[in-house]
Amino acid sequence: MNILVRKYLYGDIPEDNSGGQPQSKNNGSNDWPLWEVFIRNKQGLDHKHVGSLHAADAQMAIENARDVYTRRMEGISIWVVESKYIHASNPDEADSMYDPANDKIYRHPTFYHLPDGLTHI
């Protein structure tokens, strides 16, 4: 009686009778999009950027983010955003971008008269 035993590693999908597929160097992770991960902790009201990871889709990104960034149960909410959808302003252009706000005096409460009994604002 001959028994043939083959050992397959996780992710090996044999297409012929020779066994599992050889592993490539990058494991295909470069083909997956990059996702930015934001987590809201138990005490916080806002989500904070905690890192990035590669995943095939949003559901996989959330599950991987949970495993990687909330191992100690510190988060209560996870956001993932594909990196290609994030657009940012250029820090070198900050003066021109925020300059119009200085022209709007109603945004600066310098002309309001406060009652004498009011001590904290």
Image (cartoon, grey):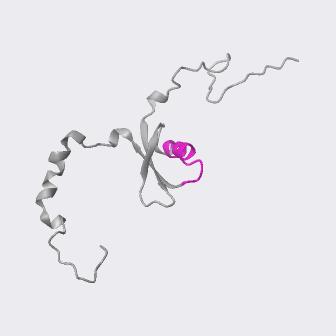
> Is residue 20 shown left or right of residue 74?
right
Placement of the N terminus among the 4 image quadrants = top right
Region of the chain picked out in magenta, as a range: 60-74
The quadrant where residue 88 appears: top left
Magenta span dominant secondary structure: helix
Give residue 120's position: percent from left, percent from top: 31, 75
Q: Is residue 54 magenta?
A: no
Seen in the picture, residue 45 relative to 84 is either above or below; the reply is below
Placement of the C terminus among the 4 image quadrants = bottom left
Of residues 107 and 16, the one nearer the viewer is 107
> Is residue 21 shown left or right of residue 98?
right
Q: Residue at x 53, y 20 (%)?
A: 25
Q: Residue at x 54, y 20 (%)?
A: 24
Q: Residue at x 18, y 65 (%)?
A: 108
Give the total number of marks visible in the rendering: 0
Give residue 54's position: percent from left, percent from top: 47, 35
> Is residue 46 shown left or right of residue 113?
right
Which residue in the rendered view is the most extreme toward the left? Answer: 103
Tell me if residue 90 can be seen. Answer: no
Tell me if residue 102 can be seen. Answer: yes
Give residue 26's position: percent from left, percent from top: 51, 23
Seen in the picture, residue 39 relative to 7 is either above or below; the reply is below
Which residue in the rendered view is the most extreme toward the right? Answer: 1
Seen in the picture, residue 10 relative to 120 is either above or below; the reply is above
The quadrant where residue 81 appears: top left
Q: Is residue 63 magenta?
A: yes
